[in-house]
Image: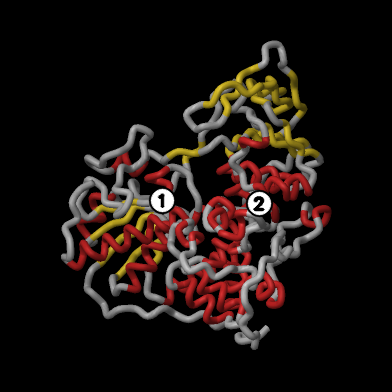
Amino acid sequence: MTGTVNNAKKKPRIVPHKVPAPEQEPLIRRSNFDEVALGYTAEMAMKEAERCLQCKEPSCVKGCPVGVPIPQFIREVRDGNFQKAIEIIKEKNLLPAVCGRVCPQEQQCEKLCLLGRKNEPVSIGRLERFAADFEHSTCRVCLPAVAPPTGKKVAIIGSGPSGLTCAYDLAKRGHTVTIFEALHEAGGVLLYGIPEFRLPKKIVAAEIELLKKMGIEFVMNAVIGKLITVDELIEKYDACFIGTGAGLPNFMNIEGENLSGVYSANEFLTRANLMKAYRFPDADTPIIRGRRVAVVGGGNVAMDAVRTALRLGADEASIVYRRSEAEMPARKEEVHHAKEEGVRFEMLTNPVRIIGQDGWVKALECVRMELGSADESGRMRPVPVEGSEFQIPVDVVIIAVGTTANPLIRQSTKDLALTKKGYISADEETGRTNKAGVFAGGDIVTGSATVISAMGAGRKAAKAIHHFLSGEETAKPA
């Protein structure tokens, strides 16, 4: 693969379907943690890029939370200028190799693609991944231009997508940035939440190494609220950004959730992803390898958990979801991959009790549901069907019904304004909180959302923090 391939510009023509991307065969990949999607070759990428209509007023850009100039980078891919393509992307997006793999483009940029009105949209995510992978494969990763030192110091709490993006933008503006991370490795949800087969950890490590080369300091094992508080940080730093995510798991509060063999999806995935429990005993952290596993929930985290359970050796792995497949919030691609790998789907099914024997899970008692009227989310409300109780024999149950904000920051920070749901109250456009010099963004403000949305919040906050530090505007409390 070379950086420039001669390819005469052609007038865009309508090609209805995306160029298919190669993948591991389902029966092979369900037994390993290698990446499922193998990515475009140069020829595939250029062919897919030719589908782009190069709209004069591209609506796809409006669907990108960080505003990547999509037609411009795709044009460079089309013409074989792969290094130029990644340089264009990185003007807006610090983590293109990550976003190209895990972001729900079908609900963001690709959803607004003009070509997608009557045909399949341009595969923007796959092209972004290709450009990013090209950069890493050629070892031509360049450090961004950094402004002269301003003498201002900023503390970033959390090394997930919002924190990394905020740190990157502030460092480029010449500010001294320190990231405080509670765990022993940096990356946040990118590291502990997303499985290796969807996002190889070497990709996250490479992006973090770039930040270190820019001079950003990482302080590991730093639990803010215990080691030091936000109020103490703001006395030592000129500004502070809170990007701790929403990592406190929700449970269903049903009988049996305290049995051995019941996991929150957070714990299950953290053991497998961050602690590499699938390598036990070569890795120190064990995990229960259930023969029959039920995962309760219908989002991307549920898909990650059930597909991980298969790779750990489960004979049967099932999704138990109280609505129909049409209401599932998980990406269609992830649902499709799960079905290919043999995951069973128990739809319109709601757990009411976990049955145990000698302290261990033995079965999941459920009730059939039917859809009623729409609820506040706009989806049909599931209603129990009387007398429809039944049991699913299982030895591991994984609860993946969402997360909320960890209370440690709010409990240890004086007078920090919160929302009714316990998230930090912050201005949507600037990330300003009610405390002077303290900003916040990502899931700790919005609740669980996408990687790219959190990055967008980090970018907005960085801009506002820069203005605050430069005295260009006052950081009025939100």
Q: How is the image coloured?
A: secondary structure
Residue 374 found in image quarter: top right
Most foreground residue, 403 or 471: 471
Report crowding for label 1: few under 14, some 14 to 19, many 20 or more residues within 10 A (C-alpha). many
Q: Is residue 408 above or below residue 86?
A: above
Image coordinates of residue 383 in percent, x first then y, are 61, 19
The residue positioned farthest toward the right in the image shown: 27
Residue 29 found in image quarter: bottom right
Q: Is residue 53 above or below residue 267?
A: below
* Residue 190 can be seen in this image: no
The residue at 49%/64% (across/down) is 58
| Label 1 to label 2: alpha-carbon separation | 28 Å
Mark on residue 277?
2
The residue at 64%/73% (across/down) is 50
Is label 2 in a helix, a strand or a loop? Answer: helix
Residue on which disc 1 sits: 442
Locate residue 17 relative to residue 265 in the image: left or right.
right
Image coordinates of residue 392 in percent, x first then y, are 75, 26
- Which three-letter amino acid code belongs to the residue tagged 2? Ala
Is label 1 in a helix, a strand or a loop? Answer: loop
The residue at 63%/23% (across/down) is 371
- Which three-letter amino acid code belongs to the residue tagged 1? Gly
- Number of marks drawn: 2
